[in-house]
Image (spheres, rainbow, N blue to C red):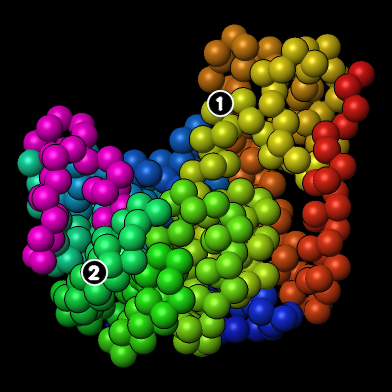
Amino acid sequence: MAPKISFDLKATDGKARTGVINTPRGEIRTPAFMPVGTAATVKAMMPESVRATGADILLGNTYHLMLRPTAERIDRLGGLHKFMNWERPILTDSGGFQVMSLAGLRKLTEKGVTFKSHVDGSKHELTPERSMEIQKLLGSDIVMCFDECPALPADRDRIAESMRLSMRWAERSREAFGDRPGHALFGIMQGGLEQDLREESAEALTKIGFEGYAVGGLAVGEGQEAMFDCLDYAPGFLPEDKPRYLMGVGKPDDIVGAVARGIDMMDCVLPSRSGRTGQAFTRYGVVNIKNARHQDDPRPLDEKCSCPACSNYSRAYLHHVFRSNEMISGMLLTWHNLHYFQEIMSGMRDAIAAGTFDAWQKDFHDTRAQGDIERL
């Protein structure tokens, strides 16, 4: 019988926490940043390169994989880990968010959502039961409940109605998930920016009981200040002995602010998407490699960074390959960004363990405020 997935909280510093999620496929050190492998690949990266940046876990997208190549095909080919050559833990989202944001002509009922595929217009139905079935076929280690995520701003009645529907779906997800040793199901708290609705949602989820809990419905257009206001109280409503996952976040300062407020896990397409569009995140802020100021610059992106882009190439070269639409541009900048994001996580884990998180945070913000190095 496969061992259960468990969470060991190792140290706290203020609300910030560091620990380990133990899974049969390896440890996930928290705070953890999960690179997004939407269609069974982190774009522009080999799996071993993603691992080399320090990632312990990847995220896969139920919605994209169910449409192409289909969960049934992945299952026949030995499951998602084998299919994409990533033997470490994988978390899959439920498909709910993508149905709301990408799918055409959708119809929402108590049962679930029917929608048209953005790929070929074919009709599909996603319910809590079907989402659990797809994620089981994929073989992911951490499975997310099927929920509905309304875009903000929305009125309170709409948010309350949506949250309560998600809680009923959470119960159905739990039932459909069944007993699967070695795999975990996470519940998703909803409730917009309404403190009492967040609390109601957390109570409903805790009563059902999950191996971990996500804070959903943020980073959907409400702005950082509103998100942080919500995170000042929302994680505290969730069980302390279980991991807390903030979905779809974010920029480096979003991540640091979320960890300071008690979050353990995050995911975002930003490091890879920005890498492909010529944006590099550095300890001194964001660098746009497409800008002409870099074309004669022999210096690295970030002299303190040990990633291949910074160790082996100049800003001038990175500028040139981006301008020339060369594939290596997206590869190098994505690697750099993922490396930097994992460096932030590692720095926070060490600082929380040492009880120096406040000083680490101050240094992080002060360094970023300096801005990029002076142009030559």
Q: Earlier in the sequence, mark 1 or mark 2?
A: 2
Along the line of sight, the residue nearer the viewer: 317 or 222: 222
Q: Is residue 49 visible?
A: no
Q: Which portion, as a residue range, is magenta?
A: 96-122
Tell me the tag on residue 277.
Answer: 1
Question: Which x, y percent locates residue 301?
Answer: 78, 31
Question: Which x, y percent locates residue 232?
Answer: 59, 73
User: Mark 2: which secondary structure?
Assistant: helix
Residue type at the position of mark 2: Glu
Q: In the image, is residue 358 above or below residue 61?
A: below
Query: Who's the residue at 72% across and 65% down the image?
Result: 348
Q: In the image, is residue 81 above or below residue 20?
A: above
Q: Is residue 174 visible?
A: yes
Question: Looking at this rendering, what residue extends furthest in the bottom direction?
Answer: 207
Residue where numbered disc 2 is placed = 161
Along the line of sight, the residue nearer the viewer: 35 or 183: 35
Along the line of sight, the residue nearer the viewer: 5 or 294: 294
Tally of marks: 2
Tell me the tag on residue 23.
Answer: none
Query: Who's the residue at 62% across and 38% down the image?
Result: 335
Position of 320 with respect to 121 (left or right) is right
Q: In the image, is residue 119 above or below residue 260?
A: above
Residue type at the position of mark 1: Thr
Position of 358 with respect to 228 (left or right) is right
Dot 2, how many residues are within 10 Å of its Cα: few (below 14), some (14-19), or many (20+)?
few
Position of 168 with respect to 300 (left or right) is left
